[in-house]
Image (cartoon, helix red, strand yellow):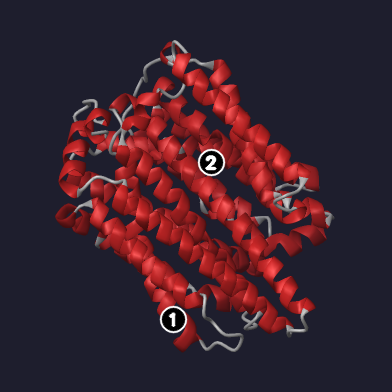
Amino acid sequence: MTILDGSIVTVAMPAIQHDLGFSPAGLSWMVNAYLIPFGGLLLLAGRLGDLIGRRAMFLAGNAIFTAASLLAGLATGPGVLIAARFLQGVGSALASAVVLGILVTLFSGPAERGKAIAIFSFTGAAGASIGQVLGGVLTDGLSWPWIFLVNVPIGVVTMALAVRALPADRGAGLRAGADVLGAVLVTSGLMLGIYAVVKVEEHGWLSGHTLGLGALSLTLLGGFVARQATARTPLMPLRILRSRNVVGANLAQMLALSGMFAFQVLVALYMQRVLGYGALETGLAMLPAALGIGSISLFASARLAARFGARAVLVTGLAMLVAAMTLLSRVPADATYAVHLLPPMLLISGGGLVLPALATLGMSGARESDAGLASGLFNTTQQVGMAIGVAVLSTMAAGRTGELLAAGTSQAAALTGGYRLAFGVAAGLLVAALAVAVTVLRRPATTETTEQGAAGGQPAASAAAK
């Protein structure tokens, strides 16, 4: 639900604008009002889960998200709907920030943990893949409020199952990390940074708006790091950053998802704006990628990681993604699906190797008491990577298209030229992620040892930092 809701509204936007009277500028807040609190609160929510209990945080997040979904479905004006979307983002952050922390503490053995993370990655990939398709189906078949109302029964069932399935955990208590100043610094810094990024397409990268907010965001985040180095009860103990695998996996994830998210957004735009596909045709055309990512993450990634190590699996998956984006960077304006689009759709299946491997490595250096924090950090870099990727690559594609149109190129050829540039840059970002995976991350034997130490509640970070 939380990942799906980031994209499900995009297809329904015209209907929502017509019914509720949104202005064109206000309509963008349908997405931004969700993404800003979602990305900005993940780190804080993950740490609070360690302090007050991860199950309690998960249930609270689901309750807020479900109630906000009901409010959104019943909204009769733009203000109410935007407020509901903001609350959905808050609930999503609280719930999703602690999920990986719950998994690594419930499943301590490397093999069973690998399977659990593979299923987690599968559900995330499924949510990202079907968001736009489901949005179109619900909007056309019923009406736009149902893209929100469908969350209500799912949320109620989720909470009922969580109460029975998840063991109660008391947490370390707020006194173990009640750094109020640090919480204000990191939350405001992340929210400002994400806001600056999502508004880049409107203001430009070198505008005073973007540069000013970006500088303020970096100043706040720098103040947060300095605060954590001196605070008596830090919100984010800096020992978690001593693990090469934690730092390397988060950096690789930010780069990889900046490129991967371009596939989901820009390929859909290319098929609709250049090739003339409808919403449902676009969803079906992207189905091989979704099925490939889902099946590999669910049935193959854990076994391959157990045999060859998470690092080797990650490198293989990233190489497949680089090949996919390289092929897309050469698509013509008159592409045929079987020749030009199906091969990269199949290669995108490498995401089914990348996502579980990154999650395994990103959580490998966390103590049990820091599992929620590590989970929140991992989800934060995921959201920041996606936001930056969409902002950068969409802006570059639009700029290149404008240049080609000014030179007299046809609209289809100009749009294609813009998308090809974006796909080429995405390939470069994935190459950078591949370089991080090869040079920073530990080799399989060390990683497994580190994971076993973390599973037993020992300080794994020192072993991973060697």
Q: Answer above or below: position of 93 versus 416.
A: above
Q: Secondary structure at mark 2?
A: helix
Report x, y in % for residue 150.
Answer: 57, 53
Residue 398 x/y as whole percent: 69, 67
Residue 5 visible in the displayed image: no
Q: Quadrant of residue 265?
A: bottom right
Residue type of the residue flagged with mark 1? Leu
Q: Is residue 382 left or right of residue 272?
A: left
> Which residue lies under the disc numbered 2?
92
Nearest to the eye among marks 1 and 2: give it. 1
Residue 408: tell me if it is visible: yes
Q: Residue sitting at 43 percent across and 76 percent down?
A: 344
The type of residue carrying mark 2 is Ser
Residue 214 drawn at (x, y percent): 66, 39
Could you say which quadrant of the image residue 97 lies in? Answer: top left
Mark 1 element type: helix
Disc 1 residue crowd, few under 14, some 14–19, many 20+, Cα 10 Å: some
In the image, taking residue 164 as reference, residue 420 lies left or right, namely right
Residue nearest the observer in this picture, 397 or 299: 397
Q: Is residue 352 above or below residue 230?
A: below
Residue at 76% x, 54% y is 202
Q: CA distance from mark 1 to mark 2?
A: 33 Å
Q: What residue do we see at 21% from left, 26% from top? A: 458
The C terminus: image quadrant = top left
Task: Identify the residue under disc 1.
Answer: 342
Where is residue 451, by image quadrant?
top left
Query: On residue 440, which mark appears?
Result: none
Tally of marks: 2
Residue at 58%, 71% in the rendered image:
421
Near mark 2 (Cα within 10 A), the count class, few <14, some 14-19 or many ≥20, is many
Question: Residue 196: x, y in percent?
Answer: 68, 44
